[in-house]
Image (tube, rainbow, N blue to C red):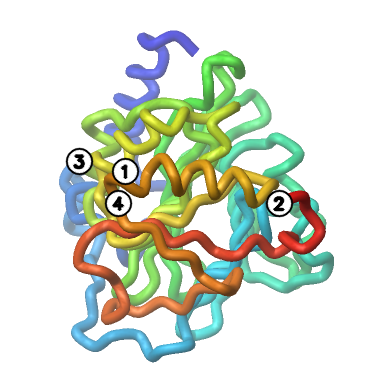
Amino acid sequence: MKRRGFISLLAGFLLFPLRRVAHAICNPSLVRLLDQGRDLVQIRPGRNPRLGHYFVQWFGHSSFLIHSGSQTKVVTDPNFNVTPGIQANAVTVSNDHFTHNNVGAVSGNPIILRGITLRQTWNPIRTSVRDITIINIPSQRGLWYGGIANSIFIYEMGSLCLAHLGNMGHLLTPEQEKVLQRVDVMMTPIDAMTNLGFEDLVKVIDQVRPPIVIPMHYDAPRQADLFASFVGERYPVRRIKDSQLVLSRSMLPKSTEILILTHPRSSLLWE
């Protein structure tokens, strides 16, 4: 996609009226950008979510289970590492590459929220699935993929805001940076082949500075080691001895940390 076309797409994003009014949103800046302040309510309850009720579980590549306090389940970008038969209330798909679009592996009659259309253009999503509000914003994939679109998905549950960058292949625009300014947890692709290289990826982290960055979109654990070595001089890196991370506002670090979850198939992959 040419730069002019992408700018037009972003302009459309800013002017696009909400198809379904969401009840909560992570970033009040987005309310102002969309001029829909009367219809959108910022939900930030004073009490923290109970420990153990909110968590993310990584299935490998770009696929996560997002689990809310009321046991609402959303699966992101399901691939072939997703356990067949896992139940969810919704599935989000950032792009339609087969490693992100194995929606048939998710049971429970979930709502399928595709971030792009069959014509490879952005598909705006503004909705709530039980107690999780889900929106998306347009982005591009790497130059190798031409004009194929990608969606950045944002999820709000309780007082927590999560962002899944999908296959993002560019630095954030000023508009995207505003929307992501209150993200607590950012799932970030680190393969450095079809997405951003490490240097630009660190620039994206600098743009958002979320408390937690979770590396994703890699299939060999060694890739996480390479990324940790590169980013370790700028941000602290912690390795989590599990593929699941319990979330609450009280556990968020005061400044950005990289949390590397254990690859769910690490014992089967070359180190």
Is residue 74 in view? no
Element at badge 2?
Answer: loop
Look at label 3 and name its amino acid.
Leu
Rendered view: 77 above or below 69? above
| Position in image of residue 85 (x %, y %) | 82, 70
Task: Tell me where residue 160 appears, x and y as whole percent.
Answer: 33, 70
Tell whether label 4 touches label 1 (CB within 8 Å): yes
- Reading the chain from its start, which is encountered first: label 3 or label 4? 3
- Residue at disc 1, secondary structure: helix
Q: Which residue is mark 4?
A: 235
Q: Is 103 above or below relative to 191? A: below
Tag nearer the camera, 3 or 1? 1
Front label number (1 vs 2): 2
Q: Is residue 220 above or below residue 63?
A: above
Q: Which residue is mark 2?
A: 271
* Picture residue at 62% right of the left edge, 47% below the top: 222
| Residue at the image point whose x is 60% and y is 61% from the top | 64
Q: Amino acid at mark 4?
A: Tyr
Q: Write down the residue under mark 3.
A: 33
